[in-house]
């Protein structure tokens, strides 16, 4: 059943489901909808009170969901961005004279939890379309990170030493990249 509560001027709509559970549970789905489940014997007022009490968490979760929403690029944007990434990767490859493989194949795809990936065995680097919305220095860091995987295929101490040798401010750039 649909319910509405107002907390500090914020209207929160939620779906209430009665179940054989011991506690009242409030959840936010990936699309931002709020739902609550409660035991049959708990009053509407008690559920409403808990939803109101969770208002700040609900607002923060919805904000995070909207910030993390994957944006779509047009075909033209994708093509231009891929060409820019190929050029950037070529320029960044100069930081790694130890790389003896030919220039890697560059791919672009929608990724929600990574900025890029490297398949060293197939000599393929794949970048996230989300990099489109990041600064040039962040993109350069991701290119260096993925190129470094052509030398060291894991995130061992040797990998981070190699990356820091090529990109001295890599820690600062990594932190900046992950600020959403």
Image: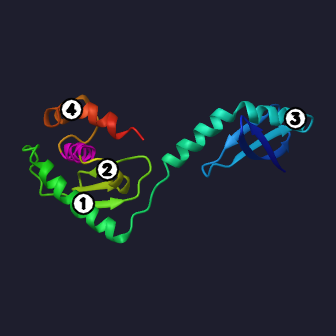
Query: Which of the two discs, 3 and 4, sits closer to the camera?
Result: 3
Foreground: 29 or 65? Answer: 65
Distance CA(mark 2)–CA(mark 4): 21 Å
Q: Which residue position is annotated with label 4?
A: 169
Distance CA(mark 3)–CA(mark 2): 50 Å
Q: Which residue position is annotated with label 2?
A: 117
Q: How crowded is mark 1: few (under 14 residues within 10 Å), some or many (20 or more)?
A: some
Q: In which quarter of the image is the C terminus?
A: top left
Is any atom of residue 36 visible in this view? yes
Q: Which residue position is annotated with label 1?
A: 106
Distance CA(mark 3)–CA(mark 4): 54 Å
Question: Element type at marker 2?
Answer: strand
Q: Earlier in the sequence, mark 3 or mark 2?
A: 3
Q: In this view, does 19 lie above or below 104?
A: above
Residue 45 marker: 3
Q: In this view, does 71 lie above or below 98?
A: below
Distance CA(mark 3)–CA(mark 1): 56 Å
Is any atom of residue 105 visible in this view? no
Label 2–label 1 contact, CB within 8 A = no
Residue drawn at point x = 18 percent, y = 53 percent: 89
Q: Which of marks 4 and 1 is nearer the N terminus?
A: 1
On whether residue 117 falls in the magenta region, the answer is: no
Distance CA(mark 4)–CA(mark 1): 25 Å
Name the image quarter holding residue 138: top left
Q: Which of marks 3 and 4 is nearer the N terminus?
A: 3
Q: In this view, does 126 lie to the left or right of 98?
A: right
Question: Element type at marker 3?
Answer: helix
């Amino acid at each position: 059943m649909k319910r509405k509560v107002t907390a500090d001027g914020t209207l929160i709509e939620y779906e209430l489901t009665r179940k054989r559970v011991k506690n009242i549970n409030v959840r936010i789905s990936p699309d931002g909808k709020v739902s609550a489940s409660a035991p049959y014997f708990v009053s509407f007022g008690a559920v409403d009170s808990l939803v109101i009490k969770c208002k700040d968490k609900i607002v923060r979760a919805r904000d995070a969901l909207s910030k993390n929403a994957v944006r779509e690029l047009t075909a033209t944007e994708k093509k231009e961005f891929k060409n820019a990434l190929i050029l950037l990767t070529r320029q960044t490859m100069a930081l790694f004279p130890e790389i003896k493989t030919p220039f890697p194949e560059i791919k672009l795809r929608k990724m929600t939890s990574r900025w890029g990936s490297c398949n060293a065995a197939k000599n393929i680097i794949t970048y996230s379309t989300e990099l489109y919305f990041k600064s040039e220095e962040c993109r350069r860091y991701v290119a260096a990170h993925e190129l470094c995987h052509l030398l060291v295929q894991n995130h061992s101490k040797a990998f981070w030493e190699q990356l820091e040798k090529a990109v001295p401010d890599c820690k600062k750039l990594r932190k900046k990249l992950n600020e959403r």
